[in-house]
Amino acid sequence: MKKMLPDYTFYNELAFDYDDMISFDSAVKNKKKQFENFLISEMNSAADIGCGSGADSIALFSSGLKVTAFDPSSEMLKNAEANSKRMNVKVEFQNYAADNIPKEFDEKFDLVVLLGNTFANIPKGKFLNSLQRCYEILRTKGQLLIQVLNYEKILVDKQRIVNITEKADKCFIRFYDFLDGNIIFNILTFSKVKPSDNKLISTKIYPHSVKNFESGLKRAGFKSIQFYSNLELSAFDKERSKDLVIRAIKTSLK
């Protein structure tokens, strides 16, 4: 039987190859442009939850915000710190998952982002608490921005291959297993010179639906909630959209 890794262990294992797999510098450039759709002049501070190796954090800092970044993977945080130093940006990094961000960060941020499928790594038992902490660390009128894959479409289509990335010396294949109602996310990495030199890591994914998010966000206290299919704010279509993007605003009355 395939060994399932907890999400933080999975990303600790992936950390060495992660930036190569996602083309880090291009990711920063793309995210900075996409953030233009959400940033307003009143925003001064941002929290990047599930920051990974720091692409979104660096893009937010480069857009003029003071950034605090959170991630449960200690190895990913090492990458993020190295990347921020390399790109000469100042980001505060914290080793916490969304649901256990300390109370000292309450009402500290004008913008909270969880991009790159972060919420798909959060189990159902921690889903509501994670949304609640997002609400609590936002200032009044602050915005929450979530991006996940559209798992309602994925569960219908059951396409196993997510992405194949070819680099100079390595290949990365990201794919799903659909087993007994569960989704297992796998990454196979192998050498192009010697394919037998390979590594397979796997973790469970939690396919939260639009309905789950809408209900959970309302319970957390959000009133203004909008759904899109991408960070360019195209309309969401449950049957066609690849991604689900959510923007929620913390109002003065809960």
Image: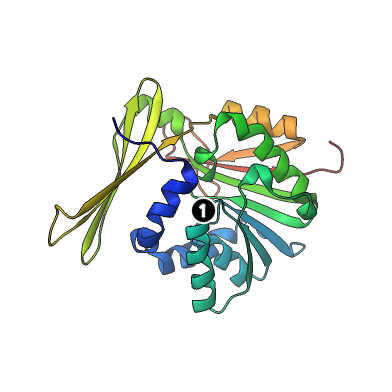
Give the quadrant of residue 62: bottom right
Q: Residue furthest right?
A: 253
Q: Amino acid at mark 1?
A: Ser
**SS for callout 1:** loop
Judge by depth and name the residue closer to the eye, 140 or 73: 73
Q: Is residue 220 above or below residue 55?
A: above
Residue occupying the point 31% across, 31% down: 177
Residue 184 at x, y = what percent?
37, 34
User: Which residue is labeled 1 in the image?
Assistant: 73
Report whether residue 168 is seen: yes
Query: Is 100 left or right of 153, judged from the image as shown?
Result: right
Q: Is residue 7 above or below residue 232?
A: above
Query: Is 170 left or right of 201, judged from the image as shown?
Result: left
Residue 146 at x, y = what percent?
58, 45
Q: Is residue 90 above or below residue 30?
A: below
Residue occupying the point 54% across, 69% down: 81
Residue occupying the point 34% across, 59% down: 21
Q: Quadrant of the N terminus?
A: top left
Q: Quadrant of the C terminus?
A: top right
Q: Is residue 240 above or below residue 89?
A: above
Give the quadrant of residue 20: bottom left
Judge by depth and name the residue closer to the eye, 120 or 156: 120
Query: Is 51 left or right of 27, judged from the image as shown?
Result: right
Give the quadrant of residue 218: top right
Residue 24 at x, y = what percent?
42, 65
Residue 122 at x, y = what percent?
55, 38
